[in-house]
Amino acid sequence: MRKVLVVDDEKSIVKGIKFSLEQEDMEVDVAYDGEEAVAKAKQNDYDIMLLDIMLPGYSGLEVCQMIREFSDVPIIMLTAKGEDMDKIMGLEYGADDYITKPFNILEVKARIRAILRRNSKSSAVKEDTRTIEIKGLRIDCDSRRVYIENKEVNLTAKEFDLVYLLVSNPNKVYSREQLLKTIWGASYPGDARTVDVHVRRLREKIETTPAEPKYIHTKWGVGYYFED
């Protein structure tokens, strides 16, 4: 049974999401403010989180950032605002996806299923028992962990998928559209900026000098590649 944490201060919305997900045989926990959300995320092992941006106490963005310090659980941000900045900020802070309110619960369930399906496929791939080591970077594909000079780097699920794809195919340049389709799926509604945000965050974590990358390089006007 998949375990989901729903975080929103609007109890009617939480009640509706909880009821709908439970019909899909999911176990649903709820939290109504940021502090409670962080506490529950530390105490439980969730498969996915739905996290509202506008929360009392810690904001959803702050909660997302704090959770990323100890967990790579997939996070879908819920926002009542439609501006692109909110969506980009959610990705900047470590979110995997976003949905703008008011939303259709069928869309919510479809996004959840898509993320859980991708994560299940990733963990089931046989070759992921390998370890890749190159230029001081080590990828433990079985545990989905990344190390730089033997020091673990805490990556989100999408950041891991991104670095794994690029490192597994050295010197191959992937366009933003190719990365978006491969990592996020053909049905993902986001655009190329999603890829740029994740690459920037990834560089900040694995590169000594992000402006002069050692691993993830930019092919201007084309896309990104790993240089061996």
Image (cartoon, grey):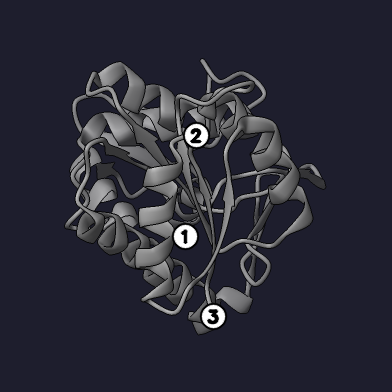
The residue lying at 39 percent from left, 28 percent from top is: 197
Please provide percent x and percent y for residue 76: 42, 45
Please provide percent x and percent y for residue 185: 25, 58
Please provide percent x and percent y for residue 169: 41, 57
In what element is the residue under mark 2? loop
- Gap in angstroms between the C-alphas marked 2 and 1: 42 Å
Q: Earlier in the sequence, mark 1 or mark 3?
A: 3
Drawn side of residue 115 relative to residue 7, left or right: left
- Mark in front: 1 vs 3: 3
The residue lying at 38 percent from left, 72 percent from top is: 117
Rate crowding at label 3 as few (under 14), some (14 to 19) or many (20 or more) other CA atoms within 10 Å: few
- Mark in front: 2 vs 1: 2
Q: Earlier in the sequence, mark 3 or mark 2?
A: 3
The residue lying at 64 percent from left, 41 percent from top is: 37
What amino acid is at disc 1? Ser
Drawn side of residue 36 relative to residue 181, left or right: right
Residue marked by disc 2: 9
- Mark in front: 3 vs 2: 2
In what element is the residue under mark 3? loop
Residue marked by disc 3: 1
Drawn side of residue 122 relative to residue 107, left or right: right
Instruction: Identify whether 183 is placed above or below 10.
Output: below
- Gap in angstroms between the C-alphas marked 1 and 3: 32 Å
The residue lying at 26 percent from left, 35 percent from top is: 100
Give 102 or 71, whichever is nearer the viewer.
102
Quarter holding residue 81: top left
Residue 168's disc is 1
In what element is the residue under mark 1? helix
Cβ–Cβ below 8 Å for labels 2 and 1?
Answer: no
What amino acid is at disc 2? Asp
Image quadrant containing the N terminus: bottom right
